[in-house]
Image (tube, rainbow, N blue to C red):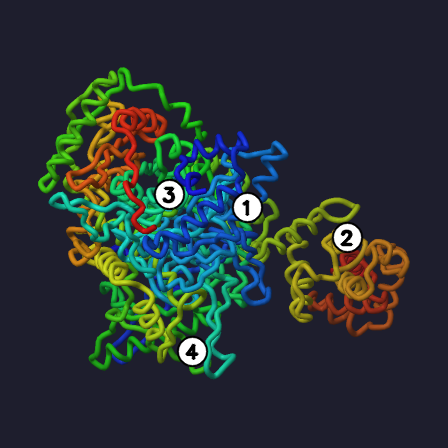
Amino acid sequence: MTASAATEPRRKSASLISGATGDWEVVIGLEVHAQVNSRAKLFSGASTEFGSAPNSNVSLVDAAMPGMLPVINRECVAQAVRTGLGLKAGINLVSVFDRKNYFYPDLPQGYQISQYKQPIVGEGEVEIDVDGDVIRVGIERLHLEQDAGKSIHDQSPEHSFVDLNRSGVALMEIVSRPDLRSAREAQAYVTKLRTILRYLGTCDGDMEKGNLRADVNVSVRKPGAPFGTRCEIKNVNSIRFIGQAVETEARRQIAIIEDGGRIDQETRLFDPQKGETRSMRSKEEAHDYRYFPDPDLLPLELEQSWVDELAKGLPELPDAKRARFMDAYGLSPYDAAVLVAERESADYFEAVVAGGKAGPVDGKLAANWVINELFGRLNKEGLEIGKSPVSAGQIGAIVGLITSGTISGKIAKDLFEIVWAEGGDPVTIVETRGMKQVTDTGALEKAVDDIIAKNPDKVEQVKAKPTMLGWFVGQVMKASGGKANPQAVNDILKAKLGI
Amino acid sequence: MTELTKLTLAEARKGLVAKSFSAVELTEAFIAAIEAANPHLNAYVLPTPEHALAQARASDARIAAGTARPLEGLPIGHKDLFCTKDVRTTACSRVLGDFKPTYESTVGQNLWDAGAIMLGKLNNDEFAMGSSNETSCFGPVVSPWRRMRNGQADNAKLVPGGSSGGSSSAVSADLCLAATATDTGGSIRQPAALTGTVGIKPTYGRCSRWGIVAFASSLDQAGPIAKTVEDAALMLRHMASFDAKDSTSVDAPVPDYTAALGKGVKGLRVGIPKEYRVDGMSAEAEALWQKGIDWLRSAGATIHDISLPHTKYALPAYYIVAPAECSSNLARYDGVRYGLRVPGKDLIDTYEATRAAGFGKEVRRRVLIGTYVLSAGYYDAYYLKAQKVRTLIKRDFDEAWNSVDVVLTPTTPSPAFAQGEKSGDPVAMYLEDIFTVTVNMAGLPGISVPAGLSGEGTPLGLQLIGKPFDEATLFQAGHVIEEAAGHFRVPAKWWR
């Protein structure tokens, strides 16, 4: 815990919680457990596939049969290194696997193989953006470890069952520094971390399947005071619950302290149904894990050249992509952030910008269309971007038609509806259905003349109040069935009305 | 057919190749010998005669077809610490119950692939923890040797050493041509020394540990116990291999060790470490050591006094490292998935009842010691310090290799003792390993070669310690000692 944390300037998102004795600041650090994206387990060749029949993905090693030995899976190591590089962290060329000893039926070896003193990844950082403040969250370390199996207690009144499919699956434990100051910051951090992992392809981030879960360390203090005693809330498995758990736990701690009590360091569980945290075990009951280096495994030594190779193969990460979107396409920070939140959205956007046959289109307009029209519609229908009925090429074509003045924005929305419902090439649809914008000056002049002739009173009014022009534009547009080019209508009206 | 059982592995191999007898005849001779002796010696915990005969028939077919493999048709015993596919494997512990592995250890598979025949599973100290083979859940193994006291034959049952006591007893009693064994702190060399047989613990990483029930992973190594140096060389050649399934296995070629035999020791530099002159060493062990020095010198070796200054810390450090690892390695025997389960009122109770009933006293003692030395607050004082000692012991040897090629020491401070003489005093028992544990701590190869008989007429051995992966030199020098000392066979098969 750093002393500087106490003196850093306040930021908007670091909301204070007011108690009876004044304002309190909440201090949060997270240990995120992310399942490594790999076909086989960390130390065995068994499959990591989700949803298989219980105990079907279990090797002799995973079941801890006598005489079985662990052999490290190279791909899991590569994934941890990629993640470390993505977190701008130092990669430790020598790391050591230890045994964490405890008894439980879903832990067949009687110990978990984990990295205790010498993790594979050292210090790094994650940048989060909350309310326009950029916050740098320190990463203390990332280490590799085995997941345990699953104990099932609700299938029989007399027996518990054990499913070892998860036993031995590789996890990355990513430990942050206590740099977060509100539930929203904690949520933003996990969201960002999840985005980075998904970009890297090192964890699918699926929290519903438990492939990403967090232990949340919470303490409270008066602003500027030293850190308070923390409690660890175990295994929180959604971003919404992380926020709720922080709020709930912070308020519980404030109430205790303001009542003259003190916080005991302990492990707690968050119950989202009851909206409370409950004690799991106190510090005194904490296990003595008797860590020691696993004698079945030699220290893990990496070649710098191999790490460099992995670094070269990394994809563009969200921060870099966002900066590029702002720079290359002139997007606002907000729009760029929305687009890069998922790699699929960002890729979709860039495909839109590439445009249809007519070539690249305006980035800002493309972003508007993707965020407002497409995302809006997808959200309404509850669809993922991968399931969008409208392709990036189709949106690109629509945006191209707007830019070239072939259709108006309003017609474009109708066109989008047609493409959404029926599919097809937007350019052809515009042709065959007569949706082209009318820019023929003669036709427009006639329409303008008609309106002026029919509304002498309005003509008087607009001369006194030029903003009335909008009413005339509206009338002409209406008469043209929306196909008139609004800019041309505007110009003709101004000339004819002499304003 | 009893004569066949007296053959060495090399002699039997020649006989089979010359078709002087068949693999089935050879195997039947051993099956008969085991039937007669085992009720008295308890060397085998599970004879597998049908399995052996089936293998023997297949071997005869191969010999007839001219497709014999290097160990074709040679019956051996297999320590019960090695997992054997579909054959009960217990590590001689109640906790494994009737456990039948679905897999074969790499060392076992290597031997069967070379044509060897398995006569059965051999007794050992429970989880290889012991130096007298008295901790087995199947009861103690008896040595075929008997001692003379005051000119009288003493009928006290002598221990065959441990933990590979089944292996040493069976080899010395002609109940197999050779046997597999394992050595964590001396479990091959000490029983070999006590029974007049040859035992070699190869360099750590030489033999795969895959499929061997683990005791202390950083120290465990497989190796053979055999009647002669040549037989041990033959066996090790076909036990050793690189194995991708064992991360600590070393990818180095396995030479033909028999090629080293007969090369002599002219110019070989032999180190004599002064720290091995310990209190409590018997006068006869000391005298035999001197004899060994003389034999090697007269064969052309040069003798050099050396110092291995951290030797005295080896045994205490070993009795921290080995129990620490065993306390963790044995955690898997929890009654949940296989082996013994003693149901209790809840989970913790089931664990406690299962492990209390499943583990014998010595195993429980070591699990407790190991748990203690790894506990928060004690780790640095015990485990970490022991690991530092280990580094210093390795360094001692690294220094020594600058001036010598092998190190010669006694294997044990004294000859075989009788059942019950030391089993009540763990420290006295642990002192049996005083000359052997350093080799495990340093990961080096060590061989024990029979060198003479004590005043009681029981065997004593000399130990040669070599550089990493230099087993060939151990066979070379061991063969010179063997030729000078002669062979020591059990004088009378008193159980017949």
- Which marked residue is nearer to the observer: mark 4 or mark 2? 4
Can you identify the residue that label 1 sits on?
B55
Q: Which amino acid type is shown beneath numbered disc 2?
A: Ala
Bin the neighbour count of mark 2 within 10 Å (Cα to Cα): few under 14, some 14-19, many 20 and up: many
The numbered mark 3 sits on a residue in which chain? Answer: B
Distance between mark 3 and mark 4 Cα atoms: 69 Å
Q: Which residue is mark 2?
A: A397
Q: Chain of mark 1?
A: B
Q: Position of residue A335 (x, y in %)?
A: 58, 57
The image shows residue B429, relative to residue B138, as above or below, that is: above
Amino acid at dot 3 = Asp
**The quadrant where residue B68 appears:** top right
Q: Nearer the viewer, residue A86 or B473?
A: B473
Q: CA distance from mark 1 to mark 4?
A: 62 Å
Residue A446 placement: quadrant: bottom right
Classed neighbour count for the residue bearing mark 1: other residues with Cα under 10 Å, few (<14), some (14–19), many (≥20):
many
Above/below status of B303 relative to A109? above
Nearer to us in this view, B216 or B177: B177
Give the mark nearer the N terminus: 3 vs 1: 1
Left or right, residue A251 beside residue A151: left
Residue at image mark 4: A271
